[in-house]
Image (cartoon, rainbow, N blue to C red):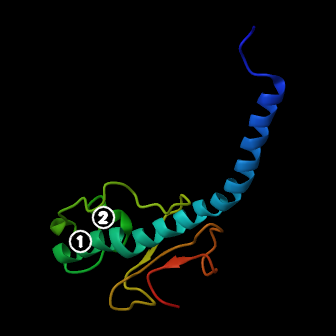
Amino acid sequence: MKKGFTLIELMLVVIIIGVLSAMVVPRLAGRSEQARIQAAKTDINSSIPLALDLYEMDSGHYPELLDYLRTPGGANAESWRGPYLKKKPLDPWGNIYIYKAPGEHNSDSYDLSSMGNDKKPGTADDVVNWSE
């Protein structure tokens, strides 16, 4: 007597796996975009502001460019005690964050935003550090 699986048994396993994946994959499909949005919110509300605040404590003002968080530059290069960030801050979609100091929306500090998945500023999927 030979031991092994019959064609019917193998087909049954393939069908079961297909049914399970058809139920699970649609539930997980939207999660990757939600994870990117949450990562951008964390960058904009926590990690980058911490680096900006450290720079501001050292120099007395926020940097003109986000690049000054990694390498010295600008008006107060002599007071630079960084690097404040290890790498260039890119949003989860691979774009640079939009930074402006002083900000238009936060005139006492800075504006920081991501254009989101559509890569267009001022659209519904933008992630910003101000309330609209």
Q: Position of residue 127 (x, y in %)?
A: 52, 76
Q: Position of residue 128 (x, y in %)?
A: 49, 79
Q: In the current view of this chain or complex, which residue is farthest to the right?
A: 8
Instruction: Left or right? Give the position of 71 relative to 131.
Output: left
- Tell me the amino acid under the disc marked 1: Tyr
Q: In the current view of this chain or complex, which residue is farthest to the top?
A: 1
Instruction: Left or right? Give the position of 57 relative to 16.
Output: left
Task: Classify 10 Å Cα crowding around label 2: few (below 14), some (14-19), many (20 and above).
Answer: many
Query: Do the residues bearing badges 1 and 2 touch, measured as CB atoms within 8 Å?
Result: yes
- SS at mark 1? helix
Q: Position of residue 35 (x, y in %)?
A: 53, 63
Q: What is the CA distance from the residue labelled 1 to the residue labelled 2?
A: 7 Å
- SS at mark 2? helix
Residue 97 in view in this figure: no
- Tell me the amino acid under the disc marked 2: Leu
Q: Residue sitting at 76 percent across and 48 percent down?
A: 19
The residue labelled by disc 2 is 69
Point out the tag, 1 or 2, that comes first from the N-terminus. 1
Residue 79 in view in this figure: yes
Instruction: Left or right? Give the position of 36 relative to 80.
Output: right
How many numbered discs, if any? Answer: 2
Instruction: Left or right? Give the position of 95 relative to 124.
Output: left
Q: Nearer the viewer, residue 132 or 87?
A: 132
Q: Residue sitting at 58 percent across and 70 percent down?
A: 116
Q: Residue sitting at 63 percent across and 80 percent down?
A: 124
Q: Position of residue 110 (x, y in %)?
A: 37, 82
Compared with 59, 88 (above or below) is above
Task: Classify 10 Å Cα crowding around label 1: few (below 14), some (14-19), many (20 and above).
Answer: many
The residue labelled by disc 1 is 55
Q: In the current view of this chain or complex, which residue is farthest to the front?
A: 1
